[in-house]
Image (tube, rainbow, N blue to C red):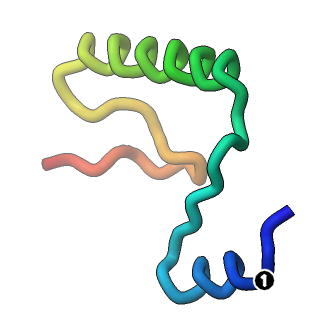
Amino acid sequence: MIAQWQIEQFHQQGFLVVEAVLSPAEIAGLQQDFDGWVAESRRHGEAWGATEDGRPPLRP
C-alpha cells in the first residue's frame, strides 16, 4: 500500500517510484516481452497497426 505522502507526490510531480514491486523473475519476463516487441518493430519500415481506439498510426 502506498502512503498519503506518495499520493501527494504523485499529484505534484506526475509520477511515483515504488521499489521492489516486481520480483526478478517478473522483471525478466517483462524484459523478454519488450525485447520481442522491439525485434518485431525492426521488421517494419513504417508505422503500422492501429491505436486501441481504432485510429490509424500517425504518418511522418
Q: Is residue 45 above or below residue 55?
A: above
Q: Residue at x 59, y 82 (%)?
A: 9
* Foreground residue among 23 and 51: 23
Q: Residue at x 13, y 49 (%)?
A: 60
Other-residue count near label 1 (Cα within 10 Å), few / some / many at <14 / 14–19 / ≥20: few
Residue 24 in which image quadrant: top right
In the displayed structure, does residue 11 sit left or right of residue 58?
right
In the displayed structure, does residue 25 sit left or right of residue 59?
right
Mark 1 residue type = Gln
* Foreground residue among 35 and 9: 9
Residue 37 in which image quadrant: top left
Residue 1 in which image quadrant: bottom right
- What kind of element bears circle 1? helix
Q: Residue furthest right?
A: 1
Q: Residue at x 27, y 34 (%)?
A: 47
User: Exactly how many numbered labels are in the figure?
Assistant: 1
| Residue 29 percent coordinates (x, y) | 62, 16
| Residue 58 percent coordinates (x, y) | 28, 50
| Residue 33 percent coordinates (x, y) | 54, 17
| Residue 28 percent coordinates (x, y) | 58, 16
Q: Is residue 40 above or below residue 52?
A: above
In the displayed structure, does residue 47 sit left or right of residue 53?
left
Q: Residue at x 70, y 80 (%)?
A: 7
Q: Is residue 45 above or below residue 39?
A: below
* Foreground residue among 27 and 51: 27
Which residue is label 1 attached to?
A: 4
Q: Is residue 55 above or below residue 46?
A: below
